[in-house]
Image (cartoon, rainbow, N blue to C red):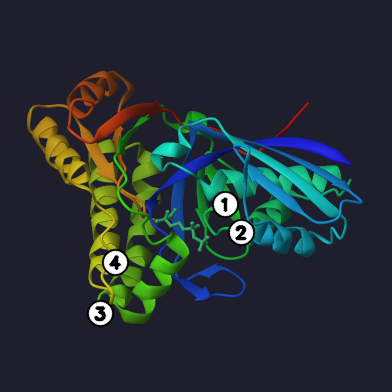
């Protein structure tokens, strides 16, 4: 009646930013991501006759309603005590619902003694957060419909993802509301979705060929276009901090000096620089001193959600 699982957060190279079905959390366009080894969450689920569900994240009480929706969908009726721990600095705004819900889906089903395929677990994790569907298979993953699938294992390509933690200001609009507002009000939203439909096959081709300059440039364009979509929403969604912009310029300057690294940015201020392992040191050296950058975490591709003893 108790189980613990771990899963890694992921960063998308072709972003998910809009739902075609809000209730079922189905995306408007397919997305491509890679799981990151140092962004790991472990979740313990205990099922029992508790008075109510409870959910703590790094020992703080959280609303268990999204977790309950996931448990209900799995057919788990018993009350759950859920304890989730992020092994990365959440205080810096790096909290990840993706790793959390992926670990929750696996731990909850194991605690209930339910045998589920990876595909079923991915579909369950999706009901907590869309991007969590991709953290279940891990590695390089594509998500288009009910569940995500791994298209290449983490060992396919030994890249580095340098996560520059850019000081987070007042609480931003979360991804859920941000993508809804963009879809409903941004004149650029439909164009972004069309762009993602073109970017995905191109990105998969570049990934299979391990073409870093072209894939890096595609990931940068895709991220900036997602932010252009969000910036054009009403009210406008500005996720960037001064340090975010400084990192973008710094990576441009680094590329001009021969250090091949490209940025991507999710719905927040942090910049993730994609580079070869031999360039990670130079990237950290350049981004770390930027005012407002609290730290730079160097990550490598990771695998999928797994049970812990
Ligand atoms: C910008 O998966 O957090 O990180 O499905 O509403 O829970 P919900 O949203 P979420 O959105 C992730 C958005 C993104 C891009 C991405 O990961 O593809």
As measured in the structure, the alpha-carbon distance from the residue carrying label 3 to the one carrying label 1 is 28 Å
SS assignment at label 1: helix
Question: Is 294 situated above or below 243?
Answer: above
- Asked if disc 2 is less than 8 Å from ligand 1, the answer is yes
Q: Quadrant of residue 274?
A: top left
Q: Residue at x 54, y 36 (%)?
A: 153
The spot of residue 161 in percent (x, y) is: 36, 33
Quarter of the image where the C terminus is located? top right
Q: Which mark is residue 126?
A: 2
Q: Residue at x 17, y 27 (%)?
A: 259
- Asked if disc 1 is less than 8 Å from ligand 1, the answer is yes
Q: Earlier in the sequence, mark 1 or mark 2?
A: 2
The spot of residue 172 in percent (x, y) is: 36, 57
Q: Residues within 10 Å of mark 3 (few under 14, many from 20)?
A: some
Question: Is 9 situated above or below 71?
Answer: above
Q: Residues within 10 Å of mark 1 (few under 14, many from 20)?
A: many
Which residue lies under the disc numbered 1? 132
Which residue lies under the disc numbered 3? 187
Q: Earlier in the sequence, mark 4 or mark 2?
A: 2
Q: Residue at x 27, y 60 (%)?
A: 227
Q: Residue at x 13, y 30 (%)?
A: 254
Q: Earlier in the sequence, mark 1 or mark 4?
A: 1
Image marks 1 and 2: residues in contact by CB distance under 8 Å: yes
Which residue lies under the disc numbered 4? 230
SS assignment at label 2: helix
SS assignment at label 4: helix
Instruction: In this rendered view, identify the residue nearer to me: 54 or 24.
Output: 54
As measured in the structure, the alpha-carbon distance from the residue carrying label 2 to the one carrying label 3 is 27 Å
Q: Earlier in the sequence, mark 3 or mark 1?
A: 1
The spot of residue 163 in percent (x, y) is: 34, 34
């Amino acid at each position: 009646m108790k189980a613990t699982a771990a899963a890694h957060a992921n960063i998308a190279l072709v972003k998910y930013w809009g739902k075609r079905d809000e209730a079922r959390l189905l995306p408007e366009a397919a997305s491509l991501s890679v799981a990151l080894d140092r962004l790991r969450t472990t979740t313990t689920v205990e099922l029992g006759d508790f008075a109510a569900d409870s959910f703590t994240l790094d020992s703080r009480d959280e609303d268990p309603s999204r977790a309950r929706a996931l448990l209900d969908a799995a057919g788990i009726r018993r009350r759950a005590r859920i304890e989730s721990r992020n092994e990365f600095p959440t205080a810096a705004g790096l909290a990840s619902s993706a790793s959390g819900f992926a670990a929750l889906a696996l731990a909850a089903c194991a605690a209930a003694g339910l045998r589920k395929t990876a595909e079923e677990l991915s579909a369950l994790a999706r009901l907590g957060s869309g991007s969590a569907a991709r953290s279940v298979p891990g590695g390089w993953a594509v998500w288009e419909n009910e569940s995500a699938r791994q298209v290449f294992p983490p060992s396919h390509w030994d890249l580095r993802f340098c996560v520059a933690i850019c000081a987070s200001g007042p609480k931003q609009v979360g991804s859920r509301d941000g993508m809804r507002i963009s879809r409903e009000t941004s004149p650029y939203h439909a164009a972004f979705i069309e762009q993602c439909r073109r970017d995905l096959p191109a990105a998969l081709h570049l990934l299979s060929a391990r073409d870093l300059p072209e894939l890096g440039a595609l990931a940068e364009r895709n991220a900036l276009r997602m932010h252009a979509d969000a910036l054009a929403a009403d009210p406008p969604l500005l996720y960037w901090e001064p340090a975010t912009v400084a990192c973008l310029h710094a990576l441009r300057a680094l590329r001009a000096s021969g250090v091949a690294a490209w940025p991507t940015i999710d719905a927040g201020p942090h910049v993730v620089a994609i580079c070869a392992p031999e360039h990670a040191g130079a990237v950290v050296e350049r981004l770390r001193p930027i005012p407002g950058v609290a730290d730079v975490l160097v990550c490598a591709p990771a695998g999928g959600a797994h049970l812990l003893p």
